[in-house]
Image (cartoon, coloured by chain):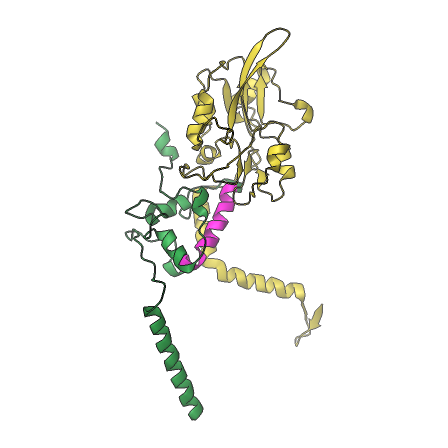
């Protein structure tokens, strides 16, 4: 696939394509330039040096308290209804050990797995894990097939069945897409270091932080206490850990 | 010579037809209200042709890499381009996005998910005491 030209050099197909690409790049330059400026202003892409996670202390969690659930609904503009079609990013689970009668309650949300099954099954790549460990749905590419909902061992995802109009500007949501806890990703990108649920918890049962940073509060707590992962047998390496379940 | 005359005549006729087309168009040109006190991130002719590429490039960086804010964020667009009467970029005949998309016959689905009204996006400064 090459032809000698007048100078005796060879004009390859690859070289020609590279040249064409360079030309196309030059033509796009004005638009690209604008984006470059904006990028410098808004900071760097997220890095895998951090891994965001939650530590939930079921000993502190109060039975019947729904403050984290309502804070999540408020923060993300969820309807917070109780109909079967209403979405739910976080739910309170009450447990009772049959033999001893010991009760425990804890919020359950997307566990932000390091090896997320929802990402494995997604046919379009809409379900993805961000470099900083947050598992998200790119609604631009989600086709609403709900494979991820079936793959998730924690029933963490919901499907939006009805058209929405009252979305929060920071949390775009729409009919026909699957969604779940984002670890308040809009807050994290803004530089805040707390989620709405952790902020709202009256007993500080939810701790948000960087699992990779040994100095963070969450890592300090994880050094002190025996924390477990839900369905640890699946070895998904969860970002959300529990104490006292 | 006859050929040149025919060319000139043809060109004149074509120009006349174009002018007539613009005036007597069956589809009226979009009328919208927009805040002209500031300038957009690029000149209007560039924006008309490339705003979709800018938004698309932008959305991938936002969703996948967490780069938010900046001048070409959709929320920032709405600060100027939301209608003064309805406060939204859609839902009214004079709404900026809707009027033009209707004119060119291109489906506008950004606002199926995104809020079409400029909202109070809380900044870090606004939240910290």
Of A55 and B74, nearer the camera is B74
Residue B94 is at least partly visible in this image: yes
Q: Residue at x 35, y 52 (%)?
A: B96
**A146 shown above or below A195:** below
How far across and down, in percent of the image, does residue A228 sit? 62, 19
Q: Which residues are magenta?
A: B46-63
Q: Main secondary structure of the magenta part?
A: helix
Q: Residue at x 56, y 61 (%)?
A: A22
Q: Is residue A234 magenta?
A: no
In this picture, residue B128 sits left or right of residue A194: left
How far across and down, in percent of the image, does residue A209 sit? 52, 26
How far across and down, in percent of the image, does residue A111 sit? 58, 27
Q: Residue at x 46, y 22 (%)?
A: A68
Q: How many marks?
A: 0
Residue A153: which quarter of the image? top right
Position of the N terminus of chain A, as image quadrant, is: bottom right
Question: Which chain's colour is yellow?
Answer: A
How far across and down, in percent of the image, does residue A195 sit? 47, 27
């Amino acid at each position: 696939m090459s032809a000698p030209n007048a100078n005796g050099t060879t004009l390859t197909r690859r070289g020609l394509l590279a040249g064409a690409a360079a030309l196309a790049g030059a033509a796009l330059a004005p638009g690209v330039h604008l984006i470059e400026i904006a990028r410098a202003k808004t900071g760097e892409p997220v890095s895998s040096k951090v891994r965001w996670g939650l530590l939930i202390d079921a000993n502190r969690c109060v039975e019947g308290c729904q403050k984290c659930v309502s804070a999540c609904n408020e923060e993300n503009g969820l309807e917070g209804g109780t109909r079967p079609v209403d979405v739910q990013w976080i739910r309170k689970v009450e447990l009772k050990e049959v033999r001893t009668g010991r009760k425990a309650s804890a919020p359950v949300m997307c566990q932000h797995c390091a090896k997320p099954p929802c990402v494995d099954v997604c046919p379009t790549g809409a379900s993805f894990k961000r470099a900083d460990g947050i598992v998200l749905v790119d609604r631009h590419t989600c086709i609403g097939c709900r494979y991820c909902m079936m793959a998730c061992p924690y029933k963490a995802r919901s499907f939006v069945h009805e058209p929405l109009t009252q979305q929060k500007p920071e949390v775009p949501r729409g009919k026909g897409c699957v969604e779940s806890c984002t670890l308040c990703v809009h807050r994290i990108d803004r530089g805040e270091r707390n989620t709405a649920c952790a902020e709202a918890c009256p007993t500080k049962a939810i701790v948000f932080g960087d699992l990779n940073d040994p100095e963070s509060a969450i890592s300090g707590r994880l050094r002190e206490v025996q924390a477990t992962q839900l369905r640890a047998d699946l070895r998904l390496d969860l970002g959300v850990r529990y104490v006292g379940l | 010579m006859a050929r040149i005359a025919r060319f000139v005549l043809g060109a004149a006729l074509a120009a006349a037809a174009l002018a007539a087309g613009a005036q007597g168009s069956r589809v009226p040109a979009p009328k919208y209200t927009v805040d002209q006190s500031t300038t957009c991130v690029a000149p209007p002719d560039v924006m008309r042709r490339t705003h979709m590429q800018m938004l698309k490039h932008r959305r991938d960086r936002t969703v996948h890499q967490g780069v938010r804010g900046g001048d070409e964020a959709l929320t920032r667009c709405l600060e100027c381009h939301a209608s003064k009467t309805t406060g939204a970029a859609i839902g009214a005949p004079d709404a900026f996005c809707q009027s033009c998309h209707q004119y060119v016959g291109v489906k506008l689905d950004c606002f199926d998910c995104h809020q079409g009204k400029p909202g109070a996006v809380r900044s870090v400064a606004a939240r910290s005491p």
